[in-house]
Image (cartoon, rainbow, N blue to C red):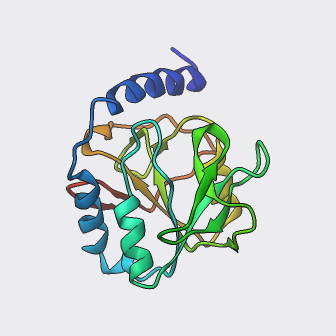
């Protein structure tokens, strides 16, 4: 039987390959519509998002709408390896700069925000809120550090699997939003 690390590595490889084949021009709008179909999700005021890379589902239209509706939005920044992420305020029109791991982030000096909701890109998910990311552990450390922050995994429907191999450090999502549904865990 493969170790937990080997199981995750194999699933990560398989789902990274699969995610590259997914997507479409209207998926970003569909995810935005699903998010706004949930009064619970709309009630959060400080929302951390992400700027999509490597086939991640595009949430830029959702972030723009959140800003327009008066929500405080932020994007993640890696300040130090093996530490939780920090979140810097971002709003439509703000310039971004290159960050670690090929990400885009707010410019130095942007206001630090402690979000109450984080939108998190996924490689894979299960219906129990298990998530698989790139393997750096940044979101797991962040969710463990920000105890009051709720987590919404963002994924294509085809990224669902029966069960994500998890250990005691892995953090579960509170919701998963896909182009067709909102799954409350």
Q: Nearer the viewer, residue 78 or 105?
A: 105
In the current view of this chain or complex, which residue is farthest to the right? Answer: 80
Quarter holding residue 85: bottom right
Q: Quadrant of residue 126?
A: top left
In the visual, does 71 lie left or right of 145? left
Image-based side of 107 in relation to 103, left or right: right
Residue 184 placement (x, y as % from top left): 34, 64
Question: Is residue 78 rendered to the left or right of residue 122?
Answer: right
Q: Residue at x 44, y 37 (%)?
A: 164
Which residue does the image show at 49% across and 53% down from the upper left? 51
Confirm whether residue 2 shows in the render: yes
Which residue does the image show at 24% across and 54% down from the upper left?
179
Asked whether the viewer can see residue 185, the reply is: no
Residue farthest along the top direction in this orientation: 1
Location of residue 91 in the rendering, given as x and y in whole percent from the top left corner: 52, 72
Task: Measuring from the top left, give residue 103's x and y in whole percent.
Answer: 58, 45
User: Looking at the image, is 123 positioned above or below residue 87?
Assistant: above
What residue appears at the point 51 percent right and 14 percent down from the top-left corner?
1
Report the number of discs: 0
- Specify the quadrant that holds the C terminus: bottom left
Q: Of residues 38 and 68, which is closer to you in this image?
A: 68
């Amino acid at each position: 039987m493969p170790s937990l690390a080997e199981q995750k590595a194999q699933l990560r490889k398989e789902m990274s390959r699969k995610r590259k084949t997914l997507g479409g021009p209207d998926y970003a709008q569909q995810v935005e519509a699903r998010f706004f179909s949930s009064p619970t999700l709309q009630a959060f005021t400080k929302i951390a998002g992400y700027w999509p890379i490597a086939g991640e589902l595009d949430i830029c239209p959702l972030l723009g709408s959140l800003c327009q509706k008066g929500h405080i939005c932020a994007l993640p920044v890696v300040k130090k390896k093996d530490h939780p992420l920090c979140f810097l305020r971002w709003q439509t029109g703000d310039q971004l700069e290159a960050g670690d791991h090929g990400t885009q982030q707010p410019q130095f000096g942007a206001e630090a925000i402690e979000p109450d909701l984080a939108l998190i890109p996924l490689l894979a998910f299960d219906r129990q809120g298990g998530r698989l990311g790139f393997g750096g552990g940044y979101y797991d450390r962040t969710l463990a550090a920000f105890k009051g922050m709720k987590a919404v995994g963002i994924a294509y429907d085809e990224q669902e699997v029966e069960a994500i191999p998890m250990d005691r450090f892995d953090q579960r999502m509170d919701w998963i939003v896909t182009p067709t549904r909102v799954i409350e865990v």
